[in-house]
Amino acid sequence: MEDSLYVKELLKVNNTWIGNTYNYKEAYEKNYLFKWEEDDQSYNNPNFDEEEREKEYNKKILVIFIIENNTRTYGLSKRRG
């Protein structure tokens, strides 16, 4: 399953967008589409392991991202184990 990242905060400073994304628990609690997809996965996949899924998702999240003039995107991620 391919993950989408959900924007938590977004701020424009001098034509540059700066923001960060939700972690797994936050996305699950605040985004109905994410919750629906996760619930669907757990219902249809007998091998679904929510704890493992959360670990894998959180390894991929961006802690902060920067978009300059819609031409360059920078992301800083934090590895969680």
Image (cartoon, rainbow, N blue to C red):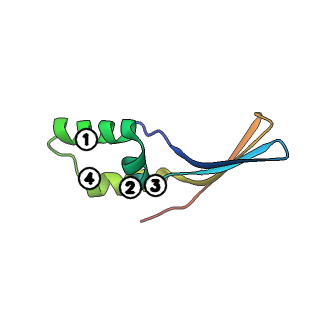
Asked which secondary structure carries label 2, the reply is helix
Few, some or many residues within 10 Å of mark 1 (<14, 14–19, 20+): some
User: Which circle's residue, 4 or 2, is located before the other in the chain?
Assistant: 2
Q: Is residue 1 visible?
A: no
Q: Amino acid at mark 3?
A: Asn
Residue depicted at 48% across the width and 51% down the height: 60
- Tags 2 and 3 touching, CB below 8 Å: yes
Q: Comparing marks 3 and 4, which lies closer to the viewer?
A: 3
Q: Which residue is mark 3?
A: 23
Few, some or many residues within 10 Å of mark 3 (<14, 14–19, 20+): many
User: Which quadrant of the structure image shows residue 7?
Assistant: top right
Q: Is residue 31 above or below residue 71?
A: below
Q: Amino acid at mark 1?
A: Asp
User: Which circle's residue, 3 or 4, is located before the other in the chain?
Assistant: 3
Q: Amino acid at mark 4?
A: Glu
User: Which circle's residue, 1 or 2, is located before the other in the chain?
Assistant: 2
Residue depicted at 21% across the width and 42% down the height: 42
- Tags 3 and 4 touching, CB below 8 Å: no
Give me the C-alpha separation between circle 4 and circle 2. 11 Å
Give me the C-alpha separation between circle 2 and circle 3. 6 Å
Q: Which residue is mark 4?
A: 50
Residue depicted at 30% across the width and 56% down the height: 52
Q: Which residue is mark 2?
A: 25
Asked which secondary structure carries label 4, the reply is helix
Q: Comparing marks 4 and 2, which lies closer to the viewer?
A: 2
Tell me: 41 left or right of 69: left
User: Which circle's residue, 4 or 1, is located before the other in the chain?
Assistant: 1
Q: Amino acid at mark 2?
A: Lys
